[in-house]
Image (tube, rainbow, N blue to C red):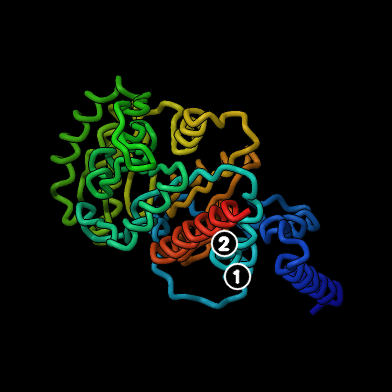
Amino acid sequence: MPLLFKCMLKVINTLIAVTASISNSTVLPSATLPQSMAVLSGFWGLPHKNLVKRLEGAKVGAWIDSMRASSPNRAKSESQEKRSWILYHPSALNTFEQITYNSKGKQIVVFLDYDGTLSPIVTDPDKAFMSRKMRATLKGIARHFPTAIVTGRCRDKVYNFVKLAELYYAGSHGMDIKGPTKSRSGKQGNNKGVLFQPASQFLAMIDEVYKILLERTKSVPGAKVENNKFCLSVHFRCVDEKSWASLADKVRLVLNEYPQLKLTQGRKVLEIRPTIKWDKGKALEFLLQSLGYENSNDVFPIYIGDDRTDEDAFKVLRSRGQGIGILVSRVAKETDASYTLQDPSEVEQFLGRLVEWKRSSSVKCIEL
């Protein structure tokens, strides 16, 4: 091994060790691990995204490779790659005190994806139920903080899963937003809440394409088309991998006749949406504005999600320089989130700790 390369490796290991010690310091609670790792990436002249790309590997270009990579089935690895990724995207549970320290004096607003975040990913999307414990914890979160569920699902369907009237619901990737019909104190209000639907003119077209896709995809065993009102989801979780190419071709051929619609991708699902400039990031900004925090420095948004579509919200938080994004994932992947949680059970633990932290903080304020 060339001497220069050995020296470079030694420098890298030293920098990682120093970064880890800084992030674990109790003297500097605000020095979060993602911020510390930014110093490391800056040392090598690599922007955040490029550093993560080096960790994750080259991005697949072909649609089929992308479909395969959308929900990888990898064994839990303790490789250097995984450890490096975790170092840059630490557990939100392990760094909970740092997160609450950074939110001190600010209003926390909680944003949550649904599938894979509040409920486990299941074979049948109509059976993606939350656990009773998760629902109770979510109710506690909504009692203390403005809380919104931002999902690709139809708003009414997610509400039927959650059934908490004190939450904001942003369905169809934020194209169907409604505010609480009950105050956070539990009282029923006369106000029916915020109602925002920026893609109303596409409703007839979405319904038309839905009917066509039902017919075109019925020959693909396991394929399921879901109408989410302002967008469509073609699930291929139960489709044999050999049929993925055929399914993708069928969907593309239909969309060729509808240039006002675009095809994106989530976890083993093809998403069909209007081409308007609206996504989960825009929904987050709209909800913050509705809450009166458009240009405020006194807000600390926390967005938790597991899907590629949640990256739009993570990017908004990074650009605002406010709050944090938390990716729910067991595997290393490119993300604009700062922290991670492995699965919905860890999401429930994090939210539960947030409720307990708020309660204890309120008690201390009363005592003072």
Q: Position of residue 348 (x, y in %)?
A: 41, 62
Q: Which residue is mark 2?
A: 56
User: Which residue: 51% across, 76% down?
Assistant: 77
Q: Residue furthest front?
A: 367
Q: Position of residue 129 (x, y in %)?
A: 25, 57
**Mark number for residue 283?**
none
Q: Quadrant of the N terminus?
A: bottom right
Q: Mark 2 and mark 1 in contact (Cβ < 8 Å)?
A: yes
Q: Amino acid at mark 1?
A: Glu
Q: Quadrant of residue 229?
A: top left
Q: Residues within 10 Å of mark 2 (few under 14, many from 20)?
A: some
Question: Would you say 236 lies left or right of 37 here?
Answer: left
Q: Residue furthest top?
A: 201
Q: Is residue 276 above or below residue 145?
A: above
Q: Position of residue 13 (x, y in %)?
A: 76, 73
Q: Secondary structure at mark 1?
A: helix
Disc 1 and disc 2: Cα gap in Å?
7 Å
Q: Amino acid at mark 2?
A: Glu
Q: Nearer the viewer, residue 279 or 79?
A: 279
**Mark number for residue 81?**
1
Question: Would you say 75 lies left or right of 28 here?
Answer: left
| N-terminal-most mark, 1 or 2 | 2
Q: Nearer the viewer, residue 240 or 269?
A: 269
User: Which residue: 54% across, 56% down?
Assistant: 363
Q: Position of residue 259 (x, y in %)?
A: 35, 26
